[in-house]
């Protein structure tokens, strides 16, 4: 089976899913799945690439402005042209890979690119599927995720599939697949990976550097919170340099900056809590790792983040942080009363889907055999 994954670098979550599919397919040779990844938006036409860059710039600088961007795309349907812009480049990829299944992990790739794939390869020769990592329906769940003519819609949790059905997906073509995270999130936990005697906070940035690390560190210093901090800065060298300089100038608070290629699965299992923007990727990683989540709401929430917050609140698996002092207060409270984060871990265990990467790949293999 040849699987072609369509992704995009809006944020870091979609590309992370693509990497996870590749890792798991390589680790399950009995399924006979080979994986190729392609970013049609960035590699087909400059207009698509501009939209990707604009998305990432908004996320880094002014999350609330994304409501304008999101609603424009919802209304304009600019990605539903009869053929994609830069179609020749995408056609070349299709003819080279000759996929049995084309899998989209991005909301802008489920319509025009599916239709064009069938036109190039033949409707009976290829199957089209979607893996959607959004955690809840409602405002923020893009209707572009759902193409009722697709052969399969894989949602991470039941709420995802319910949202797809409301947008017209046939129930029999939906599958609650669980979280497709990278393999190190499913490695056996080390018995002593988390030290109950100390509180270690992980500050995470998006893949493109969206974060509020310095403001959080200033609040913890101001309130004299006794905790250790581990910081990830995404792919932004500028953020990493700023946090490193702050740590050197403020030795009263223990801060350690780790490189971008750190084993995040092992790290999340070893810390007391993680503070991050509520992207679908970090939320799913925290749930799989049973790592209590402090949701960074500074600057407002993007539409896609709102639905993830809705899911976390529904299941009681996170606390929201609207000001830097909120983070310091919650860390102090959780350190003083360890039963609070422990209860969140128990609820994360209850809400984590029992299906996962192997079941997702098995379902895709079955889809390929139905051609």
Image (tube, rainbow, N blue to C red):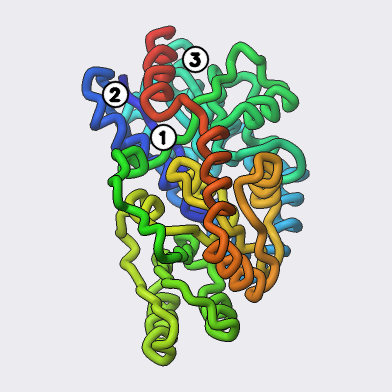
Q: Mark 3 or mark 1, which has the lower sequence index? A: 1
Q: Which residue is mark 3?
A: 123
Q: Which mark is residue 322?
A: none
* x and y, in percent, of residue 263 in the image: 31, 54
Circle nearer the N terminus (2, 1) = 1
Report which residue position mark 1 lands on: 5
Up/down of 21 relative to 329, above or below: above
Q: Label 2 vs label 1: CA separation?
A: 12 Å
Q: Secondary structure at mark 3?
A: loop
**Residue drawn where x is 67% and y is 49% of the image:** 309
Q: What residue does disc 2 label?
A: 33
C-alpha separation, residue under disc 3 versus residue under disc 1: 18 Å
Is label 3 in contact with label 1 (beta carbons under 8 Å)?
no
Q: CA distance from mark 3 to mark 2?
A: 21 Å
Decide if residue 351 is in sight here. Answer: yes
Residue 238 location (% of width, % of height): 42, 78
Using the image, determine if residue 116 lies above or below residue 326.
above
Examine the rendered structure and indicate whether residue 348 appears above or below residue 147. Answer: below
The residue drawn where x is 45% and y is 60% is: 207
In the displayed image of the protein, which residue is found farthest to the top?
370
Residue 195 in picture, x, y percent from top left: 36, 58
Q: As rendered, which of 7 and 209 lies closer to the eye?
A: 209
Quarter residue 277 falls in: bottom right
> For the point 59% across and 41% down, which residue is it?
108
Nearer to me, 249 or 307: 249
**Of labels 3 and 1, the one closer to you:** 1
* Foreground disc of the pair 3, 2: 2
Q: Secondary structure at mark 2?
A: loop
Disc 1: CA contacts within 10 A as few (<14), some (14-19) or many (>=20): many
């Amino acid at each position: 089976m040849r699987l072609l994954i369509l992704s995009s670098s809006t944020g870091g979550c979609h590309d992370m899913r693509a990497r996870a599919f590749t890792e798991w397919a390589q680790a399950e040779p009995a399924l006979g799945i080979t994986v190729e990844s392609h970013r049609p938006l960035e590699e087909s036409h400059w207009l698509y690439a501009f939209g990707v860059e604009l998305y990432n710039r908004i996320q880094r600088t002014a999350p609330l402005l994304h409501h304008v961007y999101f609603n424009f795309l919802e209304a304009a349907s600019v990605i539903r042209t009869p053929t994609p812009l830069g179609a020749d480049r995408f056609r070349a990829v299709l003819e080279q890979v000759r996929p049995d299944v084309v899998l989209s992990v991005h909301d802008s790739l489920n319509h025009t690119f599916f239709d064009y794939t069938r036109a190039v390869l033949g409707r009976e020769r290829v199957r089209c599927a979607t893996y959607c990592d959004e955690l809840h329906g409602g405002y923020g769940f893009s209707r572009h995720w759902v193409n009722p003519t697709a052969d399969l819609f894989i949602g991470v949790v039941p709420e995802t599939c319910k949202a797809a059905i409301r947008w017209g997906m046939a129930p029999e073509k939906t599958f609650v697949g669980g979280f497709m995270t990278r393999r190190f999130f499913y490695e056996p936990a080390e018995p002593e990976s988390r030290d109950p005697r100390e509180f270690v906070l992980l500050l995470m940035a998006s893949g493109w550097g969206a974060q509020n690390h310095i403001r959080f560190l200033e609040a913890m210093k101001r309130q004299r919170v006794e905790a250790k901090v581990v910081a990830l800065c995404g792919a932004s060298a500028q953020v990493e340099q700023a946090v490193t300089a702050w740590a050197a100038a403020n030795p009263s608070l223990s801060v350690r900056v780790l490189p971008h290629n750190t084993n995040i699965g092992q790290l999340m299992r070893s810390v007391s809590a993680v503070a991050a923007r509520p992207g679908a990727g970090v939320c799913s990683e925290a749930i799989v790792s049973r790592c209590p989540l402090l949701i960074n709401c500074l600057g407002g929430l993007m539409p896609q983040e709102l639905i993830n917050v809705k899911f976390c609140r529904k299941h009681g698996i996170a606390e929201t942080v609207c000001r830097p002092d909120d983070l310091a207060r919650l860390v102090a409270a959780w350190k003083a009363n360890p039963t609070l984060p422990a209860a969140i871990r128990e609820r994360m265990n209850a809400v984590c889907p029992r299906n996962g990467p192997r079941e997702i790949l098995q379902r895709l293999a079955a889809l390929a055999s139905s051609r």
